[in-house]
Image (tube, helix red, strand yellow):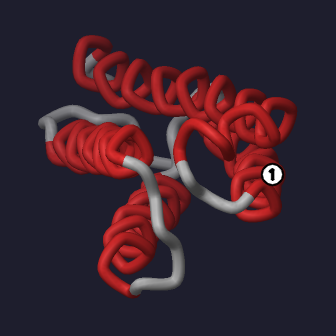
Amino acid sequence: MQNTSSSQFLRRALVADAVMTGGAALILAAGGGIASGLLGLPEPLLRIAGLLLVPFVALVAYVATRPAIAHEAVRAIVALNVAWVAGSILLLVSGWVAPTALGYAFVIAQALAVGVFAELQVMGMRRPGEAVA
């Protein structure tokens, strides 16, 4: 028998990820020009990052809305989230960009949020009674 509270935990973590990432995608893709000046990050980088998030959001939303959540798909989502965090850190330490203080804060804050989503998704998969497809 499926434990509804545990599957709901993972489902909610995925939905939150899709909603927040979708908002970020919209802001980055549509507002990259405005954000670029404030953050000190190249406009093309922001716009491309926003556009790259669109298929990710579609994947996360699709997985979150299935009757049984496929853990292999969630593992892929977690891996992509971890890669995003690593890429964010690399961006800041590489010297490829010269963000403003607000830019540093933005990149760090979004990386932390993505890391939290990854951790919540891992926790959701480990909960007893989680529905597995």
Q: Secondary structure at mark 1?
A: helix
Q: Residues within 10 Å of mark 1 (few under 14, many from 20)?
A: many
Image x and y of residue 3, in percent: 25, 20
Within the image, what quadrant is residue 34 found in?
Answer: top right
Numbered marks: total? 1
Q: Position of residue 121 (x, y in %)?
A: 31, 42
The spot of residue 72 in percent (x, y) is: 48, 64
Residue 1 in view here = no
Can you say whether 88 is above or below 106 in the image?
below
Residue shown at the point (69%, 51%) measured from the top left:
56
Q: Is residue 54 left or right of residue 17?
A: right
* Residue at the image position 83 percent from the left and 51 percent from the top: 51
Residue 87 pos. (x, y %): 44, 74
Q: Is residue 16 left or right of residue 19?
A: left
Q: Of 108 and 53, which appears nearest the observer?
A: 108
Q: Residue at x 36, y 63 (%)?
A: 85
20 vs 93: above or below: above
Q: In the image shown, does 126 or 19 lie closer to the viewer?
A: 19
Give the camera-side residue of 44 and 62. 44
Q: What residue appears at the point 16 percent right and 47 percent down from the top-left corner?
A: 126
* Quarter that holds the N terminus: top left
- Tell me which amino acid carries mark 1: Arg
Q: Quick check: can you spot residue 15? A: yes
Q: Is residue 17 left or right of residue 8?
A: right
**In this orientation, which residue lies closer to the viewer: 60 or 48?**
48
Q: Which residue does the numbered mark 1 point to in the structure image?
A: 47
